[in-house]
Image: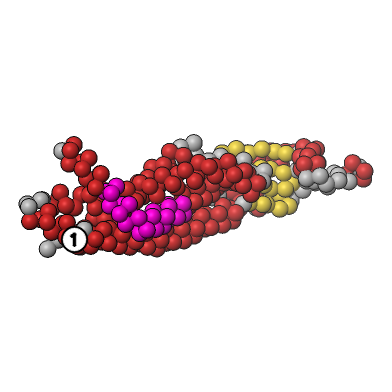
Amino acid sequence: MLRFLLFSIRRAWQGFWRNAVMSLAATVTMTLMLLMLAGLVIGLSGMDAGLRFVEQKVEVQAFIADGTPQSRIDALIAQVRALPEVAEVDYVDKQQALAEWQQQLRAQGKPDYSSETGTNPIPASIRVKLRDPHVYGNVVQTLQSAQGVVTDVLETQHVVDALLSVTGFLRTAGVVVLVLVGVTVLFIVVNTIRLAVVARAEEIEIMRLVGASDAFIRWPFIFEGLLVGLLGAALTLGILALAAQPIGQGVATLVGQVPIQFDQNLAQELVLVVGGAGLALGGLGAFISVRTYLIR
């Protein structure tokens, strides 16, 4: 069994270089497809990380009218805290809200005129964090119904919904493009192996006449297809390794202050996805070609 395996691998390597132009074309096309696949995986991982960050920041903020008695504010906080959708309720008074606003202005390099005028234009607020960022329940309605206490209610549900829609669309579009490119790669691999079969038609016929089994004839061609997929995957992973630092810097520049953290297993996931896809496409293309042109 080992001798047969080594023989098949050696014949596959010889066949790869015997038809070098088509083999290299198939490998390059395979690499491009796998780079697109890796880009889709990295992009979706980044979007999922960004979505998780946004979900952590999802809250409902209710602005309190100036001069509202503290007793009415406390009663509203207790009413909101009792809702099953609510995880936490914080009260931010005018001084704390002003300090946060001034800090944001300094971070953006903008002037703060409140210290010159001596006024505090920022209202107090109630900030409500939800157990599930997708489930608001009666939180907004409860805050809006507090007439005379709440002047305005802000909620970010539309931001999360928009991000989910964008992520879903990009995931679907990416899969469609990858399927089309994958079919192209498969077609090239099939034709590469077909040319190898045609070039060795006389040799194959002699092998049949001396009693060679179908497996003895077919497996070198299948290994040749696997070799195309393996080389394509190796080139793809090598390019990704060289581009890892520029990609990281580009993502950091793109997202700005958003602390996106990619999955710690992303590198391992890329190796498995790229390697598996390369071997699957190469092996499947070779199998289709051999099945089509060697079966009588």
> In this rendering, is residue 33 above or below 87?
below
Q: Residue at x 64, y 49 (%)?
A: 254
Determine the image quadrant of residue 129: top right
Task: Please tell me whether residue 112 belongs to the stretch shown in magenta.
Answer: no
Residue 16 within the magenta-colored segment of the rendering: yes
Q: Is residue 80 visible?
A: no
Please indicate whether residue 185 sits to the left or right of residue 159 in the image.
left
For this rendering, which residue is in front, 54 or 225? 225
Q: Residue at x 35, y 50 (%)?
A: 229
**Residue 253 image point, x, y percent:** 65, 46
Secondary element at image label 1 = helix
Q: Quadrant of the N terminus?
A: top left
- Asked whether the viewer can see residue 212, the reply is yes
Q: Judge whether 238 appears above or below 173 on screen.
A: above
As rendered, which of 59 and 167 lies closer to the eye?
A: 167
Drawn side of residue 89 relative to residue 209, left or right:
right
**Figure check: 294 above or below 127:** below
Horizontal relation, residue 218 to residue 25: left or right: left
Percent x, y of residue 237: 45, 44
Residue found at x 67% / y 43%: 257
Classified by dominant secondary structure, the portion drawn in magenta counts as helix
Q: Please name whichever residue, 39 or 18, is drawn nearer the observer in this view of the structure.
A: 18
Query: How many numbered tags mark residues here?
Result: 1
What range of the chain is rendered magenta?
12-36
Where residue 234 sits, quadrant-wise, is top left
Answer left or right for 230 relative to 59. left
The residue identified by callout 1 is 201
Identity of the residue drawn at 58% across and 41% down: 245
Quarter of the figure that contains the C terminus:
bottom left
Estimate how packed mark 1 is, as few (under 14), some (14 to 19) or many (20 or more) residues with alpha carbons within 10 Å.
Answer: some
Q: Given the image, on which type of amino acid does mark 1 rest?
A: Ala
Q: Nearer the viewer, residue 47 or 91?
A: 47
